[in-house]
Image (cartoon, helix red, strand yellow):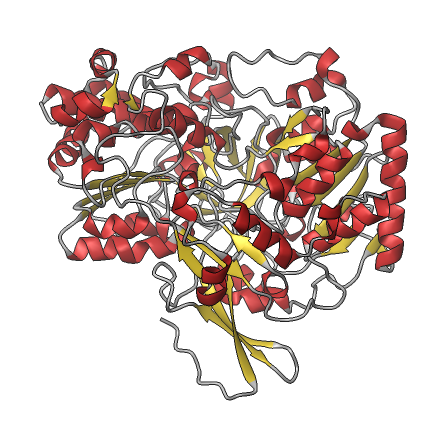
Amino acid sequence: MKAKARFGPEVELVRGACPHDCPDTCTWQVAVDRRTGRALELWGDPEHPVTQGALCTKVDRYLDRTYHPERLSQPLRRVGDKGAGVFEPISWDVALREIAQRLQEIITRHGAESVLPYSYAGTMGLIQGEGMAARFFHRMGASRLARTICAEAGFQGLIYTLGRALGVDPEQIVHSDLIWIWGSNTLTSNVHLWPFVQAARARGARLVVIDPVRTRTAKQADLWVGIKPGTDAALALGLMHVLIAEGLVDQRYVERATLGFDELRERVATFTPERTAEITGVSAELVRELARSYGVAHAPAIRVNYGMQRHAGGGMAVRSIACLPALVGAWQRPGGGILLSTSGYFQLDRRALERADLLGARSPRTFNMNRLGDALSRAADARARALHHPRPVDPTPTSADAGAQVHALIVYNANPAAVAPDQGAVVQGLSREDLFTVVLEHFQTDTADYADYVLPATTQLEHWDLIKPYGHLRLALNRPAIAPVAQSRSNAEIFRGLARAMGYAEACFDEDDQQMIQAFLAAQREPELLRCSWENLARDGHARLDVSATPFAEGHFFTPSGKCELYSRSMLEDGYDPLPNYTPPNHARAAETHRDAYPLICLSPPAHGFLNSTFVNVERLQKREREPCVLLHPDDAAPRELVDGARARVFNERGELALPVRITPDVVPGTLVIPGVWWSKLSPDKRNVNRLVSQAEADMGAGALFYDVRVNVEALPA
């Protein structure tokens, strides 16, 4: 734990919470000089049971972001070409008036659906995320956005199986005697789970990491299982085969708490260890060893993460793995079960916060955020592809359904020019001179370079917010520690200003951030949220949900049957196979000619020092990551005559990158890794890995396919 200095009376300590897209949702304390109003130091809250006084490598540098010399300080209006990033400063009054005027003109001419909001998890805050913004766009009647880019496929797979996206309480992992970290690099992307894992290991638990990459986490494990990308469901089916064949199933729990065991037994009968090995690259012996150790464990825990569901069979992969705990009765004991997200524990009533009632009878179209390139197209057939239709039973939209072109794009809490799939198509859309673009940001990102107006937003040290975690059970309150830097304003305040400029007179646009938080908390009625009152949060900074450590000990799943649905009628009705199955990734189903042209699978996990595209411009973290690179197994480097440090061309039908090679045995053969997500403008050839990613969708929820990418690599001239 970082030692905090003893400050005198001239220093105030302010509690807050990390806003970033991370399961840990740490709370922190900030030392602020009362005389100057400047934040002096920031550290993890020692009283938070998950944060435990420590922050991650990234957020430990949060003051470097807040006081960064390149922080946006005032509203900007474009004066150069789109993409050139040339702006002139203007006042807030002028910016809001001109933006509102342009939006009103566009709405009058093309309709409100020609305006598209684009946002994701630049902040996880309920107020600065979609609170006031949702009110604004509902009042306008703008097109809606399906926020599918991260976890949607896995969430749907989990919901079909368990009823909600929830699972084992991370704080209960200390009681696990076997821990599988499956498709997650905990030491990079979930570091505050690690102390609970280590506590369990100190009590005798065994740690296994299943991943195509020998990550930082895998190097600390008792066993690394190198699996071929996108084959996780096949491994789960092979494990089920052994569990059932060798009598390692908890029959009493299965009989009272599951639905469809007989059908499942028939399904997995063909997934022998030998067949599983052929698909996954995991030996038949190891498949048996894994299944046997899981079957005899007292409280086995599986931690899955979002990388494993970013391929064409991702939803089915999570759904298949989620069946395992019920088969062995793991849910009956503290520390037993599976965890993708704790989001489903938080049954939050958002109606009064987001005010969907402001839409009235209107029902605007919904675009899938993963298809932003298509959504911004002038071609109706491309826009039709971008319309959200996540299930097989949903009709495929046609050109007649596409609607008007998108003529205005408002981006907040996101950097789509860097993070969205098919970067070439996204940049082409952003480059349209007839697309009016407004970006709310801290820095002049890749996306901001294409904006007509850039509006400076506050960081987490400068505003109120309420943060719902997805990696533990403690809601957190963020107090502003300092005044807004320069002329920055909170997202909520910016949308309030835009609403006033647009002439929206509803009283909900007059509530300030603190009032919004208090009203939101007062509106909650779920008994699990009783501790999460304004009074408790204001006093302690965080409050835990009142839920059981063993949510499914007696069954009582949130599915239609009330059981863990090994067979799901809901899936059948939605057009899916109702049983767990292996849906191969697109890269495995590609035509042979395509596989020959692009024989390697490209993964793009987060770099240790970055969080999506955040922190990329923090100098200390940027220096730590050095530069964009490609990690390649020696067996794949040798025939291409690539040596460590050489520059290589990584390419497919969508684009190419020039990157230095790092040769390592820590990736499975046939796979390469490009850590991300670098801003394109900070990359040597002004492109990043998402240049190679398609806009195609996963099997469930229309999720993104960041890890379902075929490429080739060749040496570049020295």
Residue 97 in the figure: left or right of residue 677:
right
Residue 631 in the figure: left or right of residue 83:
left
- Residue 651 visible in the current orientation: yes
Q: How many marks?
A: 0
The N terminus: image quadrant:
bottom left
Residue 105 pos. (x, y %): 90, 35
Which residue is painted at 22% across and 57% down in the image?
A: 199
Question: Is 183 placed above or below 187 here?
Answer: above
Q: Nearer the viewer, residue 192 or 78?
A: 192
Task: Name the quadrant containing residue 47.
Answer: bottom left
Q: Nearer the viewer, residue 244 or 692?
A: 244
Residue 357 pos. (x, y %): 67, 33
Task: Name the quadrant containing residue 384.
Answer: top right
Which residue is painted at 64% across and 69% down in the image?
A: 67
- Residue 230 visible in the current orientation: no
Residue 8 pos. (x, y %): 50, 88
Task: Name the quadrant containing residue 407.
Answer: top right
Residue 592 in the figure: left or right of residue 38:
left
Residue 341 pos. (x, y %): 40, 41
Q: Nearer the viewer, residue 201 or 588?
A: 201
Which residue is painted at 37% across and 55% down in the image?
A: 191
Residue 675 in the figure: left or right of residue 386:
left
Question: Is 642 placed above or below 568 here?
Answer: below
Which residue is painted at 19% across and 23% down in the image?
A: 256
Q: Nearer the viewer, residue 464 or 420?
A: 464
